Amino acid sequence: MKAIYEELKVIKEELKRLNSRIELIEVGLIQEEEISEEEAKELDRLAEETRKDGIQWEKFKAELDL
């Protein structure tokens, strides 16, 4: 009987852990943010610029004091 009780405790803890993960996933899905058309265009421009020119790592590192 004690073994069954211990197994149920383990299952209960695993269910709590899974429920927490589900809540985090749901929160992440809900927090999507809409952006304006202007912001989308600016992001597209920056993405294209990055694809074209790459990232200037030395400048980036200097900005982050690395």
Image (cartoon, helix red, strand yellow):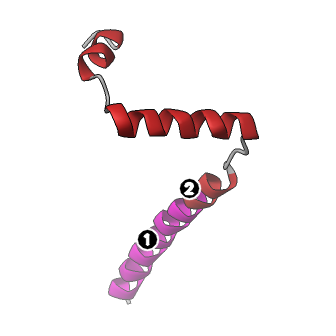
Q: Is residue 55 left or right of residue 30?
A: left
Q: Position of residue 30 (x, y in %)?
A: 69, 55
Task: Name the residue type under label 1.
Answer: Glu
* Quadrant position of residue 6: bottom left
Say few, some or many: other residues with alpha carbon within 10 Å of mark 1 (under 14 / 14 to 19 / 20 or more). few
- Dot 1 lies on which element? helix
Q: Position of residue 2 (x, y in %)?
A: 36, 84
User: Residue at position x 73%, y 45% from top?
Assistant: 34
Q: Position of residue 43 (x, y in %)?
A: 57, 36
The one nearer the camera, 54 or 29, is: 54
User: Residue at position x 61%, y 32% from top?
Assistant: 42
- Dot 2 lies on which element? helix
Determine whether 58 is above or below 2 in the image: above
Disc number placed over residue 14 in the picture, else none: 1
The one nearer the camera, 33 or 48, is: 48
Disc number placed over residue 49 in the picture, else none: none
Q: Choose the circle earlier in sequence order: 2 or 1.
A: 1
Stretch of the chain drawn in magenta:
2-24
User: Residue at position x 33%, y 85% from top?
Assistant: 3
* Quadrant position of residue 8: bottom left
Q: Is residue 7 left or right of residue 31?
A: left
Q: Main secondary structure of the magenta part?
A: helix
Q: Is residue 18 left or right of residue 2?
A: right
Q: Position of residue 49 (x, y in %)?
A: 44, 33
Which residue bears the numbered disc 2? Answer: 24
